[in-house]
Amino acid sequence: MLHLEKHINDLLYLYDCVIVPGLGGFVANKQNAELNEKTGVFSPPCRKIGFNKSLSHNDGLLIKHIANAEGISYEECYNKLTKHISILKFQLGKGESIEIGSAGELKNDAMGNTLFIPSQEESFSTDSFGLTTFHFNTLAQLKEQKEPTRRLVRRTLNAKSTRQIAASAALIIGFLLVTPDFGNQTQQSNFTGMFPKMEQTTIVKNVEVAEKREVTNEEITNPIEAEPVTIAETVPVTVKNRYFIIAGSFKVEQPARVFLGKLKHKGIQNAEIISSNGRFRVSLEGFMDKQTAIDALNNYRETNGYRSAWLLSQK
């Protein structure tokens, strides 16, 4: 059995291009170390792996390497590799993904084109062997952590009965307007000049009515309370996208989040992580309509430089 993905990964550390006859070529491009002070991401120097379908001729490099590693002849290795490539093409045609070790995976998009999704988990560079991308807290993030967290406290105010408020108001007005009798019938309260002159009997009746309403047995037995006001909360309706433009695929979540941060820094605010089939795929944008998604995919490939982007369909 040919361990094709292992041999491809081994050769990518030594050569800039590894061609799989009849399938395509894997190309390694050198990239310097990067430090993003805004997102707090440090990326060591590495060699990014790309895929060129047009490089499908047999240069003899892969077959010679496999033949020496497996201890078989060149002709026997060539025949085994040809059959293995036929099986891989059949699996791609059925919509399956082909793992190329830690380099990434091959997959056909919605239009039937074979695309390579780099995993970006391996540097494929002997200069940075053992170094990985890591995230550190920026000065702005440290400042936010030191600031105290403010909590919003909701207070519920119980509404009082309108009848109780009216009775209380009548009692207060009655006490202000009634003239107290201390042996002098003409002595009046100093507050009476503040209100229009009213008949004594009318005022007393109002007070009596207010007092009776205050101690009514019916109100004591069945107190009237205002019903709490219910405010309807508007819940936004979320429309679920079905088609996603994938720019990167990862086995673990941390590298996917680092790659997502780079896309956000470049201004792609609709980028998100789609978790499916044990992979963490980073989407540039999502759509409901398939044709709209295909048009956007072509635009990303031609205009924005994401030539290896592909379309993921989810139900």
Image (spheres, rainbow, N blue to C red):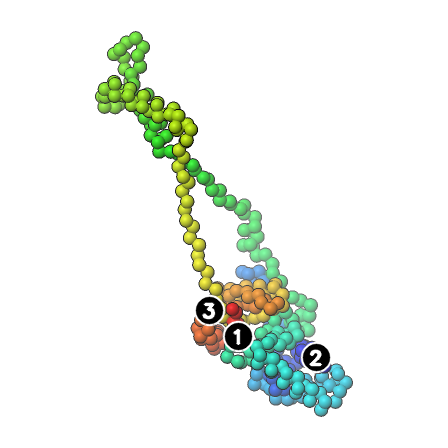
The answer to which image quadrant residue 159 occupies is top left
Quote the CA–CA distance across marks 3 and 1: 13 Å
Query: Which secondary structure, mark 2?
Result: loop
Q: How crowded is mark 2: few (under 14 residues within 10 Å), some or many (20 or more)?
A: few
Q: Position of residue 108 (x, y in %)?
A: 55, 78
Residue 45 visible in the displayed image: no
Residue type marked 3? Phe
Whether the residues at callouts 3 and 1 have beta carbons within 8 Å, the answer is: no
80 vs 199, nearest the viewer: 199
Whether the residues at callouts 1 and 2 have beta carbons within 8 Å, the answer is: no
Query: Which secondary structure, mark 1?
Result: strand
The answer to which image quadrant residue 175 occupies is top left
Residue type marked 1? Trp
Q: Where is residue 69 in the image (x, y as percent from the top left)?
A: 75, 82
236 vs 307, nearest the viewer: 236
The mark that comes first in sequence, 2 or 3, is: 2
- Residue at position x 62%, y 77% in the image: 98
Residue 218 visible in the displayed image: yes
- Residue at position x 46%, y 69% in the image: 287
- Residue 190 appears left or right of 133: left
Whether the residues at callouts 2 and 3 have beta carbons within 8 Å, the answer is: no
Q: Mark 3 points at which residue?
A: 287
User: Where is 228 relative to 247, above or below?
Assistant: above
Quote the CA–CA distance across marks 2 and 3: 38 Å
Q: Residue 3 carries which label?
A: 2
The answer to which image quadrant residue 22 occupies is bottom right
The mark that comes first in sequence, 1 or 2, is: 2
Q: Name the residue under label 1.
A: 310
